Image (cartoon, rainbow, N blue to C red):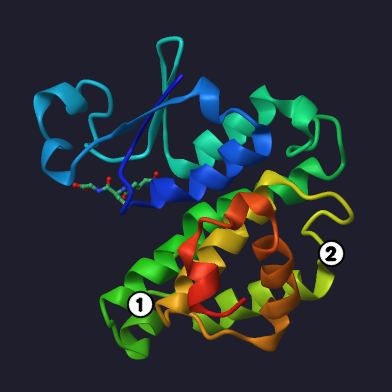
Amino acid sequence: MKLYNNSQSRGMTLLPLLKELGIEDQIEQIQVPYKEMHQAEYLSINPMGKVPCLVDQGIVISEVAAIFTYLADKYIEQGLAPALDDPKRGAYLKWMFFCHGPLTEYMDIKGFHISNEQIEAKRSSLTFGNEDSLFAFLKNGMKEVNPYLLGEKISAADLYLAYWLVFAISFKILPYLDEFKPFIQLIGSRDSMKDVPWFQKINA
Ligand SMILES: N[C@@H](CCC(=O)N[C@@H](CS)C(=O)NCC(=O)O)C(=O)O
């Protein structure tokens, strides 16, 4: 497998997953400089000119959540994805795609400094709704963790959510709410997260 990535990109969310799955040595990691992403060679792999992008036996998988889901399923024996017939599968997918959709949309929009009035006017078409709905969803999720999103077993969704939360908190996109602390500290204490700089930045 080849993973096209850039060390300044959201593709970095995948590195703890590779470690947890124990597959770092099975993946050739290729750094694509930003200035080369829109050149013909890389566009022939991902016509969007974006990283990350995983290529497995000729199959091209772009989109972070798709790569998370694909790898956790491919190495399902590592226990990071509930099986297709596991009742926890629904909640797992919900968290995975919440991170990919509403959470990252909110983070991007915050960076544009768009006013709350403008957000409110577009609330029904924004995937996160508004700030209150995003926080309500997150706080409720954090209330239900026990200690992980799916209960006693960690999943790939925990790794993805914790990475984005800690990234957003360290860049002051999200506040470091008390409700987030036990979850962030638990995931931050894993070996797979020790090279993720954002945990140290917020003293998690
Ligand atoms: N929807 C894609 C977005 C990927 C994305 O936006 N990647 C950025 C880096 S964080 C990128 O490759 N930007 C290069 C460019 O657009 O020129 C995903 O989540 O995987």
| Relative side of 120 to 134, left or right | left
Dividing the image into 4 quarters, which one contains the C terminus? bottom right
* Residue position marked by numbered label 2 in the rendering: 147
In depth, the one of 61 and 33 nearer the eye is: 33
Mark 2 CB within 8 Å of ligand 1:
no
Give the structural element (helix, strand or loop) at label 2. loop
Residue 116 image point, x, y percent: 37, 88
Looking at the image, the residue that sits furthest to the top is 57
In the picture shown, does residue 88 fall above or below 54? below
- Residue 4, horizontal then vertical, whole percent: 34, 32
| Mark 1 in CB contact with mark 2 (< 8 angstroms) | no
Give the CA separation, mark 1 to mark 2. Answer: 29 Å
Whether residue 143 is visible: yes
Query: What is the three-letter code of the residue carrying label 1?
Result: Lys
Question: On the image, which quarter does residue 134 sit in?
Answer: bottom right
Q: How many neighbours does mark 2 have within 10 angstroms: few (below 14), some (14-19), or many (20 or more)?
A: some
The answer to which of 145 and 87 lies nearer the viewer is: 145
Label 1 CA crowd tier, 10 Å (few <14, some 14–19, many 20+): some
The residue depicted at 69 percent of the width and 79 percent of the height is 181
Which numbered disc flags the more N-terminal residue, 1 or 2?
1
Q: Is residue 58 left or right of residue 151?
A: left
**Image check: 21 left or right of 7?**
right
Circle 1 sits on which residue?
110
Q: Position of residue 104 (x, y in %)?
A: 44, 62
Residue drawn 61% across and 62% down? 162
Q: Amino acid at mark 2?
A: Pro
Q: What is the x, y in percent for residue 178?
A: 69, 87
Q: Secondary structure at mark 1?
A: helix
